[in-house]
Image: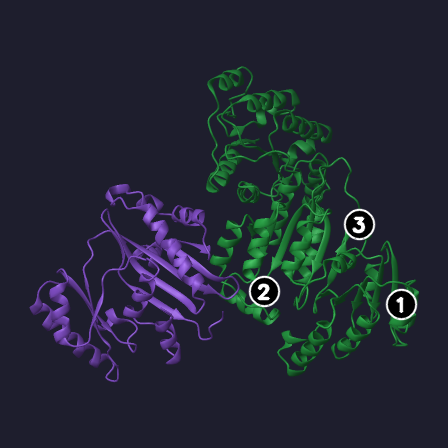
Chain colours: A purple, B green
């Protein structure tokens, strides 16, 4: 765990890539969708054959920050042949966007069934220190700003309360045909994010966006971690 | 730096105050202190200034060492270059606490300012003397008539009132004066105000910690542009059994720029700030008016405000407006019980009036205080009304008969105590003389003030508008 953080800091790299970010949060029992890094086409095919189709393929490069904007994300990959073609077209797209970009590889993960998109994040406030944010993901967080905050560390009661502090809280309760989700599991996830940041003062920001929750499961589908420029213990 | 709270206590409640470097023509600190209940001395070596100081009746010395006895509070108003020297003298003289009015340090972003601040910090940090400032107005203590502005009223409130003391901590001197004066005009006893400026040594958290256990303080209010230690601040608010009001300045980007040039503090994301203060049990306010409105409500609050209200106005239009204002803030204006409606139907004038709740009661109450008593009894006994009574006390009644207006207020006060339900009065300042004829030689402000005073004298809070009342009540509701 500390290895990933130290290695990045040594390289003066403060934005961890998706694989690093997911590995870090996973060690805090935060449920993350299985994600493997393929560094070449052969590896991509090997990984794909072990995962369940359909898949999601995402470019992993420290030089590309908005990967979906440049065609670096493909959803619903449903066969090995599609793995091939997408792998090649993604490489071309990245080189076109930034010909000096160093590509670590392609992140391969199974598609998660539809569900409610949630966001759990952490931002470090200059005055208050680390603050946890929870809300509904997708358009809700982007346009409605329907989120709530708590000071880290959260207590159990904070994790419970934050769920009912968003305006669209009825959705979490399965209103209007939304799936019924496991709220206890969600509270645990939130507390684990709080513990993760409290134990690792090098962390400046965490973004689990989205966490997809449905009646079967709850998984962080994407993760992004930013480290502080000067780690303070 | 660890704060010596014993010394801080002496400094905030001094027996001997010395002002160093006071300048005319205003001699602001000395002339504010002329009623001070303790020893007041001046130290000034400038021959031009000494006659003016003597004229105020204040004894002047040319050295700190010449002052007799213990010095509890040293107010320093010297030019910035001399501040470090005075600090050394003060430590040598073992003063209990120092307030630096002197400005021109880090906030100027000049090298000399930053250097002087570093010198000052090094000197102060060698002692445990609490220091307030620099760049601030310092300490107001009502019970000792210790002031930092002559306008800070030190007159006592009427003794029959429920007296909640407000203490105000401010990063700005102007707001320190304005809240002291403004709140007192609303009948709130302001026990202390402390303007602490750059908070280099004693900071907002130290002062909050002091006020939480201060016997003179019942309500704590802040004007802040930033805090040094956010999590300590939040935890102290959580710990406080007293209400803590927080007025945050620089809530958005342009405001934050003004803050950056005002003091050296960081601007915080207000969304986070607001949420954390609310979570810790604090009350967020956004202006002087809102602060004094909430303080007024807390001051006179004997009973819980509650969510379901009875609303009384004298005209139809106002009965709609008052309902909108309170519903907009999430209050419930319930129907009354069948029994209540039956009793009301026996005497209530429904031609040009209504008692559904809201009450349009002008034509029923009219000149008959007994009808007001009847209405209040019905409201008091109605199980659907569990919150408060809000009443529009039109000044037209006052114009017709001052005696009767007072009878109405007495009836409301009696209702409040009998049914243990808060009564909130609205006197719309904008409309307060519309019903009067032109030849009446009274100003709107004067009549509003008179009426407000009459209500406040009876422990009934008065608001300028339905919206003001509704907003303040909503902020106080969870407390």
Q: Give x and y (percent) for residue B221.
A: 64, 52
The quadrant of the image that shows the N terminus of chain B is: bottom right
Q: Check the image and report above or below for B140 versus A41.
A: above
Closer to the chain start, of discs 3 and 2, is 3
Front-most of B378 and A14? A14
Q: Give x and y (percent) for residue B78.
A: 79, 74
Q: What separation in Å lies between label 3 and label 2 (alpha carbons)?
A: 30 Å
The quadrant of the image that shows the C terminus of chain B is: top right
Q: Is residue A81 visible?
A: yes
Name the chain under label 2: B
Q: Residue B53, labelled with which disc?
A: 1
Q: Give the foreground label among 1 and 2.
A: 2
Q: Residue at x 73, y 73 (%)?
A: B126
| Furthest residue in direction left, as rendered | A81
Q: Quadrant of residue B83?
A: bottom right
SS class of the residue under badge 2? Answer: loop
Q: Residue at x 34, y 46 (%)?
A: A184
SS class of the residue under badge 3? Answer: helix
Closer to the chain start, of discs 1 and 2, is 1
Name the chain under label 1: B
Q: What separation in Å lies between label 1 and label 2 (alpha carbons)?
A: 38 Å
Q: Residue B228, labelled with which disc?
A: 2
Identify residue for label 3. B143
| Furthest residue in direction bottom, as rendered | A100
């Amino acid at each position: 765990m500390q290895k990933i953080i130290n290695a990045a800091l040594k390289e003066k790299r403060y934005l961890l890539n998706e694989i690093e970010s997911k590995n870090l949060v996973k060690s805090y029992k935060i449920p993350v969708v299985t994600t493997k890094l393929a560094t070449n086409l052969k590896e991509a095919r090997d990984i794909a054959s072990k995962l369940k189709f359909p898949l999601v393929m995402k470019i992993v490069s420290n030089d590309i920050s908005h990967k979906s904007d440049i065609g670096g994300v493909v959803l619903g990959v449903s066969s090995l042949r599609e793995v091939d073609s997408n792998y090649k077209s993604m490489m071309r797209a990245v080189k076109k966007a930034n010909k000096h970009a160093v590509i670590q590889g392609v992140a391969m993960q199974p598609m998660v069934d539809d569900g409610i998109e949630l966001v759990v994040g952490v931002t470090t406030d200059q005055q208050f220190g680390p603050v946890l944010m929870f809300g509904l993901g997708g358009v809700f967080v982007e346009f409605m700003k329907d989120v709530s905050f708590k000071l880290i560390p959260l207590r159990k009661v904070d994790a419970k309360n934050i769920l009912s502090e968003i305006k669209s809280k009825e959705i979490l309760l399965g209103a209007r045909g939304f799936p019924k989700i496991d709220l206890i599991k969600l509270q645990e996830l939130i507390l684990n994010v709080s513990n993760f940041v409290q134990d690792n003062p090098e962390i400046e920001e965490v973004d689990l966006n989205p966490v997809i929750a449905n009646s079967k499961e709850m998984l962080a589908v994407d993760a992004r971690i930013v480290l502080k420029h000067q780690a303070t213990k | 730096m660890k704060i010596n709270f014993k010394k801080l206590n002496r400094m905030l409640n001094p027996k001997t105050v010395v002002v160093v470097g006071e300048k005319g023509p205003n001699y602001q600190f000395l002339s504010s202190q002329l009623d001070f209940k303790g020893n007041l001395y001046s130290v000034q070596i400038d021959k031009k200034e000494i006659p003016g100081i003597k004229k105020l009746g204040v004894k002047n010395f040319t050295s700190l060492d010449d002052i007799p006895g213990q010095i509890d509070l040293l107010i320093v108003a010297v030019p910035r270059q001399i501040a470090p020297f005075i600090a050394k003298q003060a430590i040598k003289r073992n003063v209990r606490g120092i307030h630096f009015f002197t400005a021109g340090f880090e906030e100027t972003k000049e090298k000399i300012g930053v250097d002087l601040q570093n010198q000052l910090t090094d000197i102060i940090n060698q002692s445990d003397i609490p220091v307030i400032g620099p760049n601030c107005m310092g300490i107001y203590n009502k019970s000792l008539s210790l002031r930092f502005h002559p306008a800070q009223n030190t007159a006592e409130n009427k003794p029959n009132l429920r007296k909640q003391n407000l203490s105000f901590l401010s990063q700005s001197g102007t707001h320190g004066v304005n809240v002291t004066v403004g709140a007192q005009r609303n009948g709130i006893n302001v026990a202390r105000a402390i303007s602490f400026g750059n908070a280099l040594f004693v900071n907002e958290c130290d002062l909050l910690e002091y006020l939480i256990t201060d016997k003179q303080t019942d309500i704590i209010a802040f004007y802040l542009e930033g805090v040094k230690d956010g999590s300590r601040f939040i935890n102290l608010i959580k710990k406080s059994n007293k209400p803590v009001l927080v007025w945050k300045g620089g809530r958005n980007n342009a405001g934050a720029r003004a803050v950056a040039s005002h003091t050296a503090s960081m601007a915080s994301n207000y969304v986070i700030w607001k949420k954390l203060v609310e979570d810790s049990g604090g009350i967020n306010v956004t202006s002087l008016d809102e602060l004094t409105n909430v303080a007024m409500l807390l001051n006179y609050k004997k009973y819980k405000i509650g969510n379901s209200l009875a609303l009384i106005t004298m005209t139809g239009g106002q009965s709609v407006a008052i309902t909108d204002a309170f519903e907009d803030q999430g209050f419930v204006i319930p129907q009354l019980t069948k029994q209540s409606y039956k009793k009301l139907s026996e005497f209530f004038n429904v031609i040009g009036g209504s008692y559904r709740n809201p009450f349009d009661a002008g034509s029923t109450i009219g000149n008959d205080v007994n009808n007001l008593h009847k209405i209040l009894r019905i409201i008091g006994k109605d199980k659907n009304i569990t919150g408060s009574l809000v009443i529009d006390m039109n000044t037209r009644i006052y114009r017709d008969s001052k005696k009767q207006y007072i009878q109405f207020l007495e009836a409301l006060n009696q209702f409040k105590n009998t049914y243990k339900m808060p009564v909130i009065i609205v006197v719309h300042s904008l409309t307060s003389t519309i019903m009067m004829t032109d030849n009446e030689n009274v100003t709107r402000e004067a009549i509003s003030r008179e009426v407000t005073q009459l209500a406040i004298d009876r422990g009934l809070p008065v608001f300028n508008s339905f919206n003001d009342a509704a907003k303040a009540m909503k902020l106080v509701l969870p407390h």
